[in-house]
Image (spheres, helix red, strand yellow):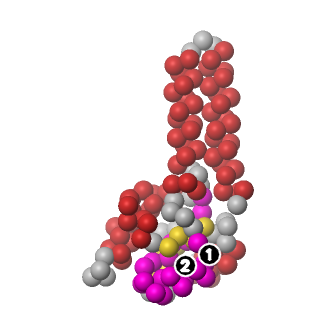
Amino acid sequence: MMRAWILPTLLVLSGSVVAVGQLFQGSPGTAAALLLAFLALAGVNSPLIFPRSVGVQEAERRAAVDGRPVVYWRPGCAYCLRLRIRLGRSAGGLHWVDIWRDPAGAAAVRAANDGDETVPTVVVAGRAHTNPDPAWVREQLSPSA
């Protein structure tokens, strides 16, 4: 769990140090702008912008019931962030599994990707798709899919 917060924490600390340096140089506006930029980067790289993760067993159980895809992801992954942002509100219709919090989820990703923990890996109807196009994932949520 803590590993997911390392990058956001480092970004906040770095931004604070840079902002304090700008304050000592007499640039409060620059300090505020830089601090806000670092805080935004920390927020984007934190687990907070992703829907709540569930364990792999729970995600597979829910997917079997409702037919929705399971997304395996990890904090700090640029491709996971791209998928999340491009899905918009429909991201809540997926079952998200954080592989850093769930060792069984990491094992499922390795099994689907020849031993690599490549994310995002999206499982639709029992078939794994590594780093799929977000538009395709959105189509899998539609009733006609």
- Whether the residues at callouts 1 and 2 have beta carbons within 8 Å, the answer is yes
Which residue bears the numbered disc 2?
Answer: 59
Residue at (42, 71) in percent of width and height: 93
Mark 2 falls on what kind of element? helix
**Residue 142: within the magenta?**
no
Residue at (51, 59) in percent of width and height: 50
Name the spot of residue 74 as percent of width and height, x first.
Answer: 60, 63
Q: Which mark is residue 118?
A: none
Residue at (65, 48) in percent of width and height: 7
Residue range of the region highlighted in magenta in the rendering: 54-75
Q: Is residue 56 left or right of residue 123?
A: right
Query: Quadrant of the rendered structure where residue 83 is?
Result: bottom left
Which residue bears the numbered disc 1?
Answer: 55
Mark 1 falls on what kind of element? loop
Residue at (50, 63) in percent of width and height: 51
Q: Is residue 32 left or right of residue 142?
A: right
Q: Nearer the viewer, residue 144 or 136?
A: 144
Find the distance from the CA under tag 1 to the CA under tag 2.
6 Å
Q: Nearer the viewer, residue 63 or 23?
A: 63
Q: Is residue 110 above or below residue 16?
A: below
